[in-house]
């Protein structure tokens, strides 16, 4: 694909902007109308015996939550180190823009999620009386309007996986088939992180949906700014 021709530009934006946006809007509306948040949280809560039995379990709390967070930070640290060495190493110098893209897209996406968590004031699942807490349940959008909840939306931990959607867009830039491996890695890790937190009672599924969408479009935006016009002619 030649990204600088009108036909292939339209295909790129169709596949990476318009279709994902339509899927997100459909999913968000469907989840809201179908009360999917409550339905799924009820299932998890009942399966765990009417309590969040996995909240402090080793697998969900230590392995996936704490160790998973460290793994994501380690990847970022390796990329940062490689970027720093690119000013010394002639070999790494040729990859400076790509390394900078990964760091900005993934790191910036995670920072954006953190900022949104701090200003959205949406409570965790375990805060509601329906799930062992003290608050009366209110859906995400009403909580955002009221600004009286905690800092649990969007899902922060899931961003440790979804932020690496940047690998996919870097693969698009390099016109490499390993972009699909990057996509699978980011989606797979994000899903594992997200489901783990749902099993702990930390998040509803829509919290993870929004994190996925924000990370996707942030990586796309940074791709447009940093790499799009410099992409090779064919892919």
Image: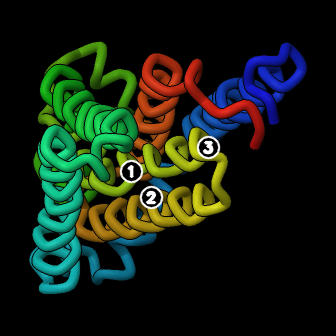
Residue at coordinates 66% horizontally, 26% vertically from top-left?
Answer: 17
Name the disc covering residue 172, or none: 3
**Badge 1 density bin: few <14, some 14–19, many ≥20, Cα 10 Å:** many
* Colouring convention used in this rendered image of the protein: rainbow
Give the image location of residue 120, x and y in percent.
23, 23
Q: Which residue is mark 2?
A: 186
Left or right, 147 with respect to 22, comes to left
2 vs 3, front mark: 3
Using the image as rendered, state which of residue 87 and residue 36 is in the foreground.
87
Q: CA distance from mark 1 to mark 3?
A: 14 Å
Classify mark 2: residues with Cα within 10 Å, few (<14), some (14-19) or many (20+): many
Q: Secondary structure at mark 2?
A: helix
Q: Quadrant of residue 113?
A: top left
Q: Earlier in the sequence, mark 2 or mark 1?
A: 1
Lower sequence index among marks 1 and 3: 1
For label 3, the SS is helix
* Residue at image coords 63%, 40%: 27
Q: Which residue is mark 1?
A: 164
Q: Quick one: label 2 or label 3, which is nearer the N terminus?
A: 3
- Camera-side residue of 139 and 57: 57
Check if mark 2's residue and mark 1's residue have beta carbons within 8 Å.
yes
Task: In this rendered view, identify the residue nearer to me: 28 or 184.
Answer: 184
Where residue 197 appears, x then y in whole percent?
Answer: 27, 63
Q: Secondary structure at mark 1?
A: helix
Asked whether disc 2 touches disc 3, contact meaning CB atoms under 8 Å apart, the reply is no
Quadrant containing the N terminus is: top right
Q: What separation in Å lies between label 2 and label 3 (alpha carbons)?
A: 15 Å
Give how far apart the Cα atoms at labels 2 and 1 are. 5 Å
């Amino acid at each position: 694909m030649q990204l600088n021709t009108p036909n292939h530009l339209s295909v790129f934006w169709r596949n990476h902007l318009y279709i994902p946006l339509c899927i997100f809007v459909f999913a968000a509306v469907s989840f809201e109308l179908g009360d999917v948040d409550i339905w799924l949280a009820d299932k998890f809560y009942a399966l765990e015996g009417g309590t969040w039995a996995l909240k402090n379990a080793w697998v969900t709390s230590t392995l996936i939550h704490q160790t998973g967070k460290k793994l994501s930070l380690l990847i970022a640290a390796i990329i940062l180190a490689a970027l720093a060495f690119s000013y010394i190493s002639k070999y790494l110098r040729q990859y400076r823009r790509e390394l900078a893209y990964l760091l900005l897209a993934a790191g910036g996406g995670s920072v954006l999620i953190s900022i949104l968590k701090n200003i959205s004031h949406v409570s965790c699942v375990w805060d509601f009386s329906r799930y062992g807490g003290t608050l009366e349940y209110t859906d995400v959008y009403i909580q955002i309007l009221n600004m009286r909840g905690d800092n649990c939306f969007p899902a922060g931990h899931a961003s440790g996986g979804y932020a690496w959607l940047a690998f996919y867009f870097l693969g698009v830039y390099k016109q490499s088939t390993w972009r699909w491996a990057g996509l699978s890695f980011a989606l797979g890790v994000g899903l594992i992180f997200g489901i783990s937190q749902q099993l702990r009672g930390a998040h509803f599924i829509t919290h993870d949906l929004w994190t996925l969408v924000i990370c996707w479009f942030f990586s796309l935006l940074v791709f447009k700014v940093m790499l799009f016009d410099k992409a090779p002619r064919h892919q």
